[in-house]
Image (tube, grey):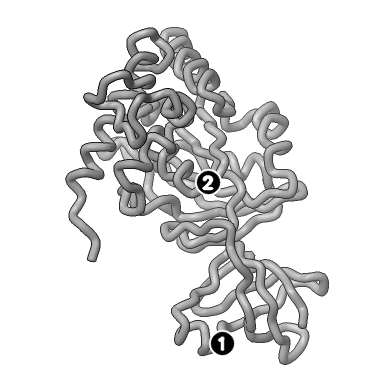
């Protein structure tokens, strides 16, 4: 039975790339019965009725999956945030980072539009970049129409499934156009009234870039911490995850407990104040979350 990877899902059809090309497939009824929905990125086996059409017979075990956007087996997330227009937002970046970390996906931070910043803004962005690099994150400072952007990004895509995410209007589609000039990806001007762009991508599709695949998606439509528990949040902050082992109490929330290694690091400058403040805000949000039934 042939095997392949779903690279596009649209209107009930799944497009499976395999050694013979791309086969348009439908899901078998058993998937609906077992509540299994094939996702872009899934490794599957299928039966082909002819050279172009077939049915997906089996979806293999996933290493992760996202609900919004619906995609599976993601290796890394390119988190695109602009330096200006809209202004860089570390609180929103930390929200994305927590969600990505919770799925055990490697984040790559890409700060775009560095070609249009003034000196004061550049210095501020470079300070943020240094903070996130100190934590251990890869941070790329890019300009939209710049060959250096291609040189920086291309090596990260090798043999990986990547997803782009971030604020609307920051240039995600524009970066994809630089990487693949042959793609006709629609871009919208930023709404001056709302201070953000409008979504133009309507479905999930894997686009081949180099020897890897990049998901062109509508972006994250939900940024709520619905699947993260209070005791799990600090694990989504790498600098806290490492220090938590030295806290006196197991399950320390790093708020009011004595002999907390995280709070000691905060006092000594080992953790940035804004990252800790974001952690506290997210923790309260999780505590206030309505219980799931």
How far apart marks 2 and 1 lie (CA) works out to: 30 Å
Neighbor class of circle 1 (other Cα within 10 Å; few <14, some 14-19, many 20+) is some
- Quarter of the figure that contains the N terminus: bottom right
Q: Return the residue nearer the eye: 2 or 206.
A: 2
Local crowd at mark 2 within 10 Å, few (<14), some, or many (≥20)? some
Q: Position of residue 207 (x, y in %)?
A: 65, 56
The residue where tag 1 is placed is 28
| Residue found at x 54% / y 21% | 133
For residue 271, side relative to residue 51 (left or right): left
Of residue 100 and residue 116, the one placed in the foreground of this image is 100
Vertical arrangement, residue 15 with respect to residue 278, above or below = below
The answer to whether residue 216 of the structure is visible from this angle is yes
Above or below residue 45? Residue 135 is above
Q: Earlier in the sequence, mark 2 or mark 1?
A: 1
Image quadrant occupied by the C terminus: bottom left
The residue nearer to you, when weighing 68 against 246, is 246
Label 2 secondary element: loop
Q: Which mark is residue 42?
A: none
Counting from the top left corner in percent of width and height, residue 39 is at 54, 68
- Give percent across and percent down for residue 23: 70, 77
Residue at left offset 69%, top offset 77% = 45
Circle 2 residue: 104
Q: Quadrant of residue 124?
A: top left
Q: Is residue 57 above or below residue 257?
A: below
Labels 2, 1: front one: 2
Whether residue 73 sits left or right of residue 209 in the image: it is left
């Amino acid at each position: 039975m042939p095997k392949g990877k779903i690279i596009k899902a649209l209107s009930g059809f799944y497009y499976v790339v395999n050694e013979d090309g791309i086969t348009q497939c439908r899901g078998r009824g058993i998937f609906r019965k077992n509540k299994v929905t094939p996702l872009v990125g899934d490794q599957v086996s299928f039966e082909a009725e002819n050279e172009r059409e077939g049915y997906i017979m089996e979806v293999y075990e996933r290493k992760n999956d996202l609900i919004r956007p619906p995609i599976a087996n993601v290796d890394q997330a390119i988190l695109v945030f602009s330096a200006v227009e809209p202004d860089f937002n570390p609180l929103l970046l930390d929200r994305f980072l927590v969600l990505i970390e919770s799925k055990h996906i490697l984040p790559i931070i890409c700060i775009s539009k560095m070609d249009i910043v003034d000196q004061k803004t550049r210095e501020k962005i470079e300070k943020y970049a240094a903070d996130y690099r100190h934590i251990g994150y890869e941070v790329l400072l890019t300009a939209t129409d710049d060959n250096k952007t291609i040189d920086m990004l291309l090596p990260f895509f090798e043999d990986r499934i990547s997803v782009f995410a971030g604020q609307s209007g920051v240039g995600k589609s524009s970066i994809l156009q630089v990487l693949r000039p042959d793609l006709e990806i629609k871009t919208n001007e930023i709404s001056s009234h709302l201070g953000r762009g409008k979504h133009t991508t309507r479905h999930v599709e894997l686009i081949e870039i180099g020897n890897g695949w990049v998901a062109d998606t509508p972006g994250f439509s939900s940024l709520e911490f619905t699947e993260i528990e209070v005791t799990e949040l600090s694990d989504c902050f790498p600098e806290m995850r490492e220090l938590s082992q030295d806290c006196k109490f197991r399950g320390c929330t790093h708020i009011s407990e004595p002999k907390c290694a995280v709070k000691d690091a905060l006092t000594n400058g080992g953790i940035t104040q804004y990252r800790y403040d974001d952690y506290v805000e997210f923790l309260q949000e999780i505590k206030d979350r309505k219980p799931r039934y």
